[in-house]
Image (cartoon, rainbow, N blue to C red):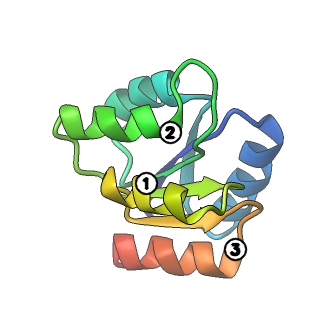
Amino acid sequence: MPKVLLIDDSRFTRKNVSEYLASKGYKIVEAENGISGLNVLEAQKPDLIISDLLMPEMDGYIFLEELSNRNIHIPVIVMTADIQETTKKRVMDLGAFAIINKPPDYTQLIKLIESLTNE
């Protein structure tokens, strides 16, 4: 099964999403912000990234920019409570594959993961 990197500063969100995805057979690695996400990314080589936007130290926007700057082409699903169209456009312009609302619709999330990992 694919390895998913989950980046979110909310321990509660990480716990809930991680437990759900693990129950579906996915291997989950976690990070609490973009900086630790980049470190985990290098060490763990995930197949897919799910990232929050608003986080301390390095937010999701800068994280997406860093992926581009480092020429890293791992699909990213942004998961955020921000539902503004300007946010959606900015995230997609920065290279995200999709944006979903928080709390996530797990059926939608699994479909996105499956479409990105060919499971």
Whole-angstrom CA distance, mark 1 to mark 2, is 9 Å
Q: Sequence order check: which comes first, mark 3 or mark 1?
A: 1
Q: Which mark is residue 106?
A: 3
Residue receiving disc 2? 60
Residue 20 pos. (x, y %): 73, 63
Q: Sequence order check: which comes first, mark 1 or mark 2?
A: 2
**How many residues crowd mark 2 within 10 Å: few (<14), some (14–19), many (20+)?**
many
Residue 62 pos. (x, y %): 41, 32
Q: Residue furthest top?
A: 57
Front-lying residue, 67 or 3: 67
Residue at (60% x, 67% y) in the render: 100
Residue 69 pos. (x, y %): 20, 33
Q: Residue furthest left?
A: 71
Q: Are marks 1 and 2 in contact (CB under 8 Å)?
A: yes
Residue 34 pos. (x, y %): 49, 29
Q: Which mark is residue 91?
A: 1
Q: Is residue 73 left or right of residue 39?
A: left
Whole-angstrom CA distance, mark 3 to mark 1, is 21 Å
**How many residues crowd mark 3 within 10 Å: few (<14), some (14–19), many (20+)?**
few
Q: In the image, which is nearer the foreground, mark 2 or mark 3?
A: 2
Q: Look at label 2 and name its amino acid.
A: Gly
Q: Is residue 118 left or right of residue 79?
A: left
Residue at (64% x, 70% y) in the render: 24
Q: In the image, which is nearer the foreground, mark 3 or mark 1?
A: 1
Report the quarter where the C terminus lies.
bottom left
**How many residues crowd mark 1 within 10 Å: few (<14), some (14–19), many (20+)?**
many
Q: Quadrant of residue 12?
A: top right
Under circle 3, the secondary element is helix
